[in-house]
């Protein structure tokens, strides 16, 4: 991840090693085949991860070097008899300035240390409700409702948090969400003949709060979709679909400041799937 979208003009970089985690899934379903009725409820648990993380920002180190150059010079003149902290404590400056200098030096030492640290991430729990029923011959109506517990979610990266603390006076997460996410999809599917079928759908997503980070500058969306499937034999099929999204307006924030407004945006999504039934 590079930092121009998160900390402007400081050259921040972070690297995360691959990790795996385990959770559990549970669900229940009910169906009446005669009317093509199916109802299912699925729960997915949180999954915890610990990622080995390496961070650096040479530009921040350079900025700190300039800020504390006088103190570094006094430390050098002491020829090893005084530490940075001892020099700062002896200076005729305010307690606030002393604390700022000590925090800057601590951050510089962190950034110059190439050892990796652990970043803890937990993917949130979620619930899915799926419903389908026949409404006429060869035609079904379907719906899906999904809840994801994003409210209060955040990812705190050690050195990134220290940088934002120094620059803004408040420690910041790389990602923050303050609301749970709700989404819903409704649609109609129809079997045209033994080889062809299709569906139309409409969807809504609440988003997970506003303002957002620059890594995901949208606040929910609305969409419409169209899909089709061709089955040349009973055991094979090829399907495709396309969706158009109206993306919700959002304000992006970085280091406690608003860095951009995202308005009147849209997007296209498409997919293709081929399969063989055993």
Image: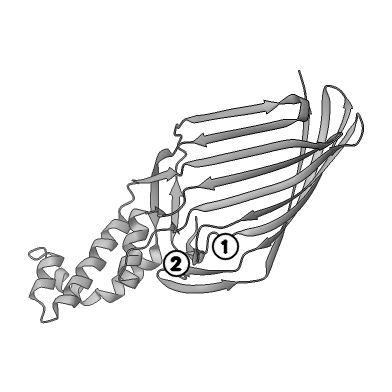
- Residue 175: x, y in percent? 45, 57
Mark 1 packing: few (<14 Cα in 10 Å), some, or many (20+)? many
In the rendered image, residue 21, in percent from the top left (x then y), is placed at 44, 34
Q: Position of residue 263 (x, y in %)?
A: 63, 71
Tally of numbered discs: 2
Q: Nearer the viewer, residue 149 or 188?
A: 188
Q: Earlier in the sequence, mark 1 or mark 2?
A: 2
Tell me the residue at 39%/63% (across/down). 58
Up-down relation of residue 66 to residue 189 (above or below): below
The residue wearing badge 1 is 219
Quarter holding residue 63: bottom left
Left or right of residue 72: residue 220: right
Image quarter in which the C terminus is found: top right
Is 259 drawn above or below residue 31 in the view shown?
A: below
* Residue at point 77%, 22% (across, down): 277
Q: Is residue 121 above or below residue 263?
A: above
Q: Report the mark closest to the observer, 1 or 2.
A: 1
Find disc 2 in the rendering and name its residue: 7
Q: Nearer the viewer, residue 100 or 274?
A: 274
What percent of the width, then of the height, locates residue 95? 14, 76
Q: Which type of secondary structure does the marked residue at label 1 adopt? A: loop
Q: Residue 49, located in which quarter of the rendered image?
A: top left
Q: What is the C-alpha distance between the residues marked 1 and 2?
A: 21 Å
Q: Is residue 98 left or right of residue 56?
A: left
The residue at 65%/55% (across/down) is: 204
Q: Which of the 4 image quarters holds residue 107?
A: bottom left
What residue is shown at x 71% (from left), y 37% (from top)?
132
Q: Is residue 64 left or right of residue 210?
A: left
């Amino acid at each position: 991840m590079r930092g121009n979208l998160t900390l402007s003009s400081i050259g921040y970089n972070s690297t995360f090693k691959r990790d795996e985690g385990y959770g559990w899934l549970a669900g229940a379903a009910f169906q009446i085949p005669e009317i093509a009725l199916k109802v299912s409820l699925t729960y997915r648990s949180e999954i915890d991860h610990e990622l080995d993380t390496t961070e650096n920002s040479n530009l921040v180190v350079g900025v700190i070097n300039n800020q504390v150059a006088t103190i570094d010079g006094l430390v050098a003149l002491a020829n090893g008899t005084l530490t940075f902290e001892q020099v700062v404590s002896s200076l005729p400056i305010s307690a606030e300035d002393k604390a700022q200098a000590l925090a800057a030096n601590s951050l510089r030492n962190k950034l110059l240390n190439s050892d990796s640290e652990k970043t803890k991430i937990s993917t949130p729990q979620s619930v899915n409700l799926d419903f389908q029923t026949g409404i006429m011959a060869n035609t079904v109506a379907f719906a899906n409702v999904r809840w994801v517990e994003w409210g209060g979610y955040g990812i705190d990266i050690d050195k990134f948090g220290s940088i934002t603390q120094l620059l803004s006076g408040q420690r910041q997460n790389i990602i923050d969400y303050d609301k749970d996410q709700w989404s819903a999809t409704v649609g109609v599917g129809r079997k045209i003949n033994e080889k062809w079928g299709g569906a139309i759908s409409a969807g809504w997503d609440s988003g997970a709060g506003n303002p957002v980070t620059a890594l995901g500058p949208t606040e929910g969306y609305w969409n419409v979709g169209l899909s089709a499937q061709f089955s040349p034999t009973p055991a094979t099929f090829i399907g495709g679909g396309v969706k158009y999204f109206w993306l919700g307006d959002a304000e992006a924030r970085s280091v406690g400041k608003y860095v951009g407004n995202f308005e009147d945006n849209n997007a296209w999504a498409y997919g293709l799937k081929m399969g063989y039934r055993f």
